[in-house]
Every structure is written in C-alpha cells, then in structure tokens.
Image: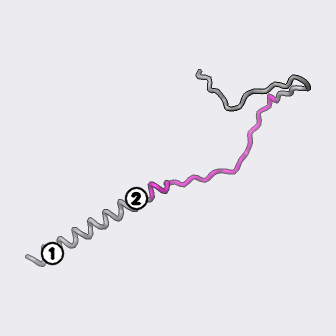
Amino acid sequence: MVEVKSMFREVLPKQGQLSVEDITTMVLCKPKLLPLKSLTLEKLEKMQQAAQDTIRQQEMAEKEQQQITH
C-alpha cells in the first residue's frame, strides 16, 4: 500500500480528554443529477449533423446539375 501524505497533520491534545467515535453512520446527501451527454459531446454531434447536411445539399445540387446538363 502506498502511503499518501495528507495536507492536514494529526494533532493530539496534551491536556484534557480525548474521545474517539467508532460508530460510522451513513450520511444522506442530495442526489446529483448528471447529464446523459456532456455539452462537448452535444456540440460535436451538432457539428457532425451540420456537416452531413451540407454534404447532402452539395450532393443534391450536383445531381440537379447533372440532370440539367443531360
């Protein structure tokens, strides 16, 4: 096991009482809702869709040009 140095150091009192709680309890917190898709992924998908639409329009224009010339 690798020991990780913590940014906090342990301080033990030299006078007074020291109490230790061995009981661990579950702490409930608000659920965090995560998006199913990240914003970056959504942007990439929009860019890809726009590129595909542009290619389709160019292909349609080429087909129309070929039909006109033939």
> Which residue is found at the position 35% from the left and 59% from the top?
48
Q: Quadrant of the C terminus?
A: bottom left
Could you say whether the residue bearing mark 1 is in a helix, strand or loop?
A: helix
Specify which label sits upstream in the sequence, 2 or 1.
2
Which region shows up in magenta?
A: 21-42
Q: Is residue 47 above or below residue 13?
A: below
Would you call the spot at circle 2 few (<14 residues within 10 Å), some (14-19), or many (20 or more)? few
Which three-letter amino acid code belongs to the residue tagged 1? Gln
Magenta span main SS:
loop
Q: Is residue 41 left or right of residue 12?
A: left
Coordinates of residue 58 in the picture (x, y in percent): 23, 69
Instruction: Let me know if residue 36 is in the magenta part.
Output: yes
Answer with the quarter of the image where residue 2 lies.
top right
Q: Is residue 59 above or below residue 36?
A: below
The residue labelled by disc 2 is 45
Coordinates of residue 13 in the picture (x, y in percent): 85, 25
Q: CA distance from mark 2 to mark 1?
A: 30 Å
The residue lying toward the viewer, choosing from 23 and 2, is 2
In the rendered structure, find residue 65 and report the number of the disc placed on it.
1
Q: Is residue 1 left or right of residue 7?
A: left
| Identity of the residue furthest to the left in this view | 70
Q: Is residue 35 above or below residue 52?
A: above
Coordinates of residue 33 in the picture (x, y in percent): 60, 53
| Identity of the residue furthest to the bottom in this view | 68
The residue lying toward the viewer, choosing from 6 and 32, is 6
Q: Quadrant of the N terminus?
A: top right
Which three-letter amino acid code belongs to the residue tagged 2? Glu
Would you call the spot at circle 1 few (<14 residues within 10 Å), some (14-19), or many (20 or more)? few
**Number of numbered callouts drawn:** 2
Q: Is residue 8 left or right of residue 53?
A: right
> Which residue is found at the position 26% from the left and 65% from the top?
55
